[in-house]
Amino acid sequence: MELTFSKPLKAHTTPIPGVVLYDLPVHGDNRGWFKENWQREKMVALGLPDFRPVQNNISFNEKAGTTRGIHAEPWDKFISVATGRIFGAWVDLREGPSFGTVFTAELDPSQAIFIPRGVGNAFQTLVDNTAYTYLVNDHWSADAQGQYTFLNLADPSSAIAWPIPLEQAELSDKDRMHPVLSDVVPMPAKKILVLGANGQLGQALRQAYSGTPTVEFAGRSEFDLTDPDAFSGRNWRNYSAIINAAAYTAVDEAETPEGRRGAWAANVSAVAKLAEVAEANGIILVHVSSDYVFDGTRPVHTEDEPFSPLGVYGQTKAAGDAVVAAVSRHYIIRTSWVIGAGKNFVDTMASLAERGISPTVVDDQIGRLSFTQDIAAGIVHLLETGAQFGTYNLSNTGEPRSWAEIARSVFELNGRSAADVTGVSTEEYFAGSAAAARPANSTLDLSKIVDAGYRPRDMDEALKAHTAATRQRQGS
């Protein structure tokens, strides 16, 4: 088979998810030939993952019939032929419905193939003096060998039709001893790390990912974001995403000297370290933000509105957002008025209603509640669908209302009259206290998250469900 010159760069999908075969333009004349073996910009534009190779390896094979594999490695590979010709065989050894799927092809220097982590890779040289090259996106180490998954070259269920029969081929003793497919332990998917897993959102994420073995949950005792040592001792290449549900949220306390230091440490310095880890390892960073990054002078806030925080808490959240936005693969989830398990406004109002107390509640701050169940479901949706990276507003839907109006709804759901809640201005409510300034308007434009295929529940529907669940837990 002669080498074909000047083919256009083209991608071909295969039966194995994520395995893509590429035609490479090879330019030749009487002196020989030249090709762009790896061209990030052009290939990413064709859909190749921006997998960030860090090591280039070459396997030289003196004789035709040399056969190597089948090895599934804990990193991605971009494979091509420098000289000669091979028969390549790839078997999906990852957990999931495509486990065991086989793809084969002959490759010469005018072709290349991308092999994702966990797909078994093997080749057989078809001519003498064949050089097989591959880029990988992690550095080889002796420890990494323990994460390999292997398959026997002669596995009967894969039934690979080797051009040169294996009994006539050159194989290593190790490759002859690998297990058949029925005995292979599939390579697990990369892990998702949830930080702040004991907080309101963290608990909702625990429920959303219940029964998913590849999701790791860490509260502050397992991973203290403010401790630099927490970031060492992990092989970050084994993670696909970090969901940062941890934050300093004491809005008023943040205005004190001690609170200011705590807010900046948790919401900025720690986030900068997370961003560094994510960028260095190609990890998706999901970061939860707040309506407090705005001053509330606009009636509705879009994702691209410039920051204008009123207080220290908002300043630290805005600074954290700016840091995360510099990460290549990120989702910033901007929320408002968060309600979940633990101390929150809705449960406080329900408790007052039950105890016969008639409260005074602010009536000049307007927005929507964000139930943690809906925030968690939105995060899962963005990660599972591979939505475009960027910032997404995420609250519940419905007509924006004041805190006082929401309190009246809570009272009615708990058998009290809405008239038992008295409205008051923010200025009157906080008179004589050292409270931080609050945005008057916290309503978030939700069109972007809806366009991405996720529509949160209506606020009233979510409020009723939350109230019913709370009453059931309390046995009333």
Image: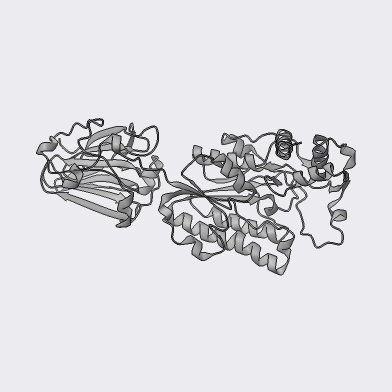
Residue 101 x/y as whole percent: 32, 32
> Where on the picture, by quarter, is residue 353?
top right
- The residue lying toward the viewer, choosing from 104 and 308, is 104
Q: Is residue 8 visible?
A: no
- Give the image's coloring scheme: one colour
| Residue 453 in the figure: left or right of residue 401 | left
> Where on the picture, by quarter, is residue 427?
bottom right
At 33% from the left edge and 31% from the top edge, which residue is drawn?
15
Please identify the quadrant where the N terminus is shown. Answer: top left
Please identify the quadrant where the C terminus is shown. Answer: top right
| Residue 380 in the figure: left or right of residue 300 | left
Residue 21 x/y as whole percent: 30, 37
Outermost bottom residue:
257
Task: In the rendered view, tell whether residue 430 sits above or below residue 467.
Answer: below
- The residue lying toward the viewer, choosing from 23 and 93, is 93
Residue 160 x/y as whole percent: 22, 32
At 18% from the left edge and 39% from the top edge, which residue is drawn?
3
Q: Is residue 51 visible?
A: yes
Outermost front residue:
475
Residue 429 x/y as whole percent: 86, 54
